[in-house]
Image (cartoon, rainbow, N blue to C red):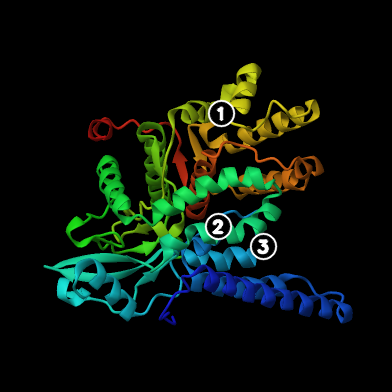
Amino acid sequence: MKEQSKIPVSKVQRASRVLQTGVKVGGNYLKHYGKTVFYKEVNKSNLHEENAEDIYNTLSELKGSALKVAQMMSMDKNMLPKAYQNKFAMGQYCAPPLSYPLVIKTFKKYFGKEPDQIFDTFTKSAINAASIGQVHQATLNGRKLAVRIQYPGVADSVRSDLKMIRPFAVRLLNISKKDLDHYMEEVESKLLEETDYELELQRSIELSASCSPFDNMVFPAYYPRYSDKKIITMDWLDGLHLSEFVQTSPNQVLRDQLGQALWDFYDYQIYDLKQVHADPHPGNFIVQPGGKLGILDFGCVKVIPEEFHSKYFRLLNKDIISREAELEQIFYDLQFVYPEDTPEEKSLFIRLYKQLIQLLGKPFHMREFDFSNDQYFQSIYRMSEQISNMEEVRNSKKGRGSKHSIYINRTYFGLYNLLNQLGATVKTRRAKLSNVAQCA
């Protein structure tokens, strides 16, 4: 993969690249509609592929929050055409890496030394490259290490990048600028946290220690001595990324074992620790040769406020549907419904959210759930599409749901998709591990 020797870091440089891409995408549309004049059967698949390629190339060059948002969008199968999903998903661990001279520059800035002066060996080319940083393999005293280096200028460009995408988000999400700003504050704070490698190092050590007693799960050790503001060093975990592992056609026992490990990992964080690894995409999980699941990257962690937690997770209780007064009050408290809504709007959104929580909460209503059931996922996509196409919903122009639900919804959506990829059947009852509780 071609390496980058520099990243556009100034507002003008980054805005200029976005503008150039916009012009190119506009040209793709002109070519497409020109073809439809002569060939009536032309569909939009080629247009989507060309646009996805052009947009991804620009985002992967910009890196940082621009590429991270695209990666997040790729996880929602209803938000984007498949060509965009496939291309943007590459931002999880297949983005173009930075050249070695820029890596040396970062090491000299924070350690005063080049990588070869610190480690016994250090790969000059990145092994993996994603939206915020890239990973090199190193060795030291016989230990194989993963050294993650943050791209230059990523933290400084978060706010300006989000300002650039605001107009697109208003149109895509169909909400007012005021409501969008409410949600953007949450996204911005999380993206800034992801660029704070000192915070990530602390959380990685703490959450790994809390969750390490779980079976079939492994966490790398972290090395503060060889970490700094833009560099994190940890043990190297051998194995395959989850999406690569699935391509090897593993047996059902192993699929279920890994699926159960994933479910218990997230269940324990959400209900006991009340803070959760909120970036569940395949690039953050490694399946080791022995069948254990390696957990990577605690950069995006959502700390769940008690007031939100106590209300939101009551919605997963199967009996809540029959307690109408309590349910409606939760809808108001979580901003799914507003006091100023018209009676028609209140009736509509209460009905829609009832249907949604019954459908999305299904795995919690059973002792065991088969996530390989594609019909279940199709029903979710169909309902989401139906709701997004409803004229009453489009005309609402209101952001629905607490800002805290953004990363919790993302976490569950990502977890469900991982379990579907695995084709796993898992026991969805609360994990009761006394040794875990004692270690937390």
User: How many neighbours does mark 2 have within 10 angstroms: few (below 14), some (14-19), or many (20 or more)?
Assistant: some
Question: How many residues crowd mark 1 within 10 Å: few (<14), some (14–19), many (20+)?
Answer: some
Residue under numbered circle 1: 315
Q: Is label 2 in a helix, a strand or a loop? A: helix
Q: Is residue 308 above or below residue 175?
A: above
Is residue 399 found left or right of 263 in the rendered image? right
Q: Position of residue 130 (x, y in %)?
A: 43, 66
Tag 3 residue: 81
Q: Which residue position is annotated with label 2? A: 162
Name the residue at 63% across, 76% down: 20
Residue 129 numbered mark, or none:
none
Q: Please, what is the three-letter code of the amino acid marked with disc 1?
A: Leu
Residue type at mark 3?
A: Pro
Quadrant of the snapshot with the N terminus: bottom left
Mark 1 vs 2: CB contact within 8 A? no
Q: Is residue 386 left or right of residue 131?
A: right
Towards the viewer: 33 or 240: 33
Instruction: Locate residue 26, reporting x and y percent.
Output: 73, 74
In whole angstroms, how far apart are the C-alphas of marks 1 and 2?
31 Å
Secondary element under disc 3, as helix, strand or loop, is loop
3 or 1: tag closer to the N-terminus: 3
